[in-house]
Image: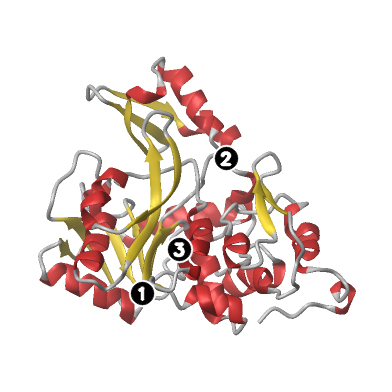
Amino acid sequence: MQEIDSTNATLLPSQILEEKVWQKNLCSGCRACIAVCLADSLAYDHNRNCPVQVNPCIDCKACLDACPRLPDNLEMIVSPEIIGPYLEIKNVRSKESCSRFQNGGAASALLAAALDEELVDCALIMGLDRWSQKSHPRVVWDSGDLEKCAGSKYTSNDVLESVKDLVKDQHVKNIALVGTPCSVQAVGLLRRSSNEYAVKLAQKVRFMMGLFCFDAFNDSVIEKITNVIGEPSWRIDKLSAGDGLMTVTLRDNRVKTIPLPALAEFIKPGCKGCGDFTARLSDISLGGLGSAPGMSSAIIRTPEGMGLFKIAEELGYIESWDGVRIEAIEKIGKIKLKRNGF
């Protein structure tokens, strides 16, 4: 898919990414290049906030097809449309309850249906160290473990790095993956690719669920939050960003808030290169904006997404209604586009 111009003909893929993405602080941190590199040439450098080459490159160029920040790829995925293509838009929530669910627990319910009905072998989502409040990728094999991972995560978007081992596992045929727009863009690019390494990864992602995302924060934001609220990290039960506030729910049900502008210095640099608020290349997009209270807005985009949604609804995992306020989603999406220069 990726065509390299003559000036880059002698450069290795990692050198092209270094020149066009990493040195310019455009890297989203999605780790798609690491996930698709079966030669283990790349590793993530947390100090630089981007990957680095650590082993010899076999010059397969799969990483070039995966990167959502490479200029040639960016041209294919940037759009002035906020909502993007869809089949239906619904208010949705889980029919089960959990104190850590946000926006009705729709993502957890959809994943539970996929796992219980054996539509996928596993789900790849972000888990959380509830002592430090730092998130990390987690492979879930049983729907009973989904509640342990419930709730939004704001300090990482590196879910794709764990795909590497799943791609190599011959027993894993189909995966459900939940990610922010940069991760969704990467999978969308890989789905379009003809590169053999890219195809191996893309073929295993049966369902790609995208999350509405305005910004992601680096891990240092947790220390800032704990300092502001005057509580240790382990007292935090849930974080929720919206309406200009970071809302912190503590284990004893007390609630404290922090204005989001106070956390602006912790936004990942690569977020400034993103023009996608609603994860337009996903099968289903989910977010709290525009929905009825206690529910998620679900943008069902593909036949695969519609199939999963209908199965979950018919089997009683979710319930849904019309009435999503599309204009509210578009308003915030346009603000993100304008702020990031698109």
Q: Secondary structure at mark 1?
A: loop
* Percent position of residue 263, x then y: 52, 31
Q: Is residue 296 visible?
A: no
* Percent position of residue 104, x then y: 22, 50
332 or 9: which is nearer to us? Answer: 9
Residue 94 lies left or right of residue 70; in this view the side is: left
The quarter of the rendered structure image containing the C terminus is bottom right
Q: CA distance from mark 3 to mark 1?
A: 10 Å
Type of amino acid under label 2? Ile
Type of amino acid under label 1? Arg
* Percent position of residue 275, x then y: 56, 60
Q: CA distance from mark 1 to mark 2?
A: 29 Å
249 or 66: which is nearer to us? Answer: 66
Residue highlighted by disc 3: 279
Residue highlighted by disc 2: 267
Please rate how many residues cluster around mark 1, counting C-alpha atoms within 10 Å: few if below 14, some from 14 to 19, many from 20: many
In the rendered image, the vertical position of residue 340 relative to residue 285, given as above or below:
above
Residue highlighted by disc 1: 301
Give residue 32's quadrant in the image: bottom right
Q: Secondary structure at mark 2?
A: loop
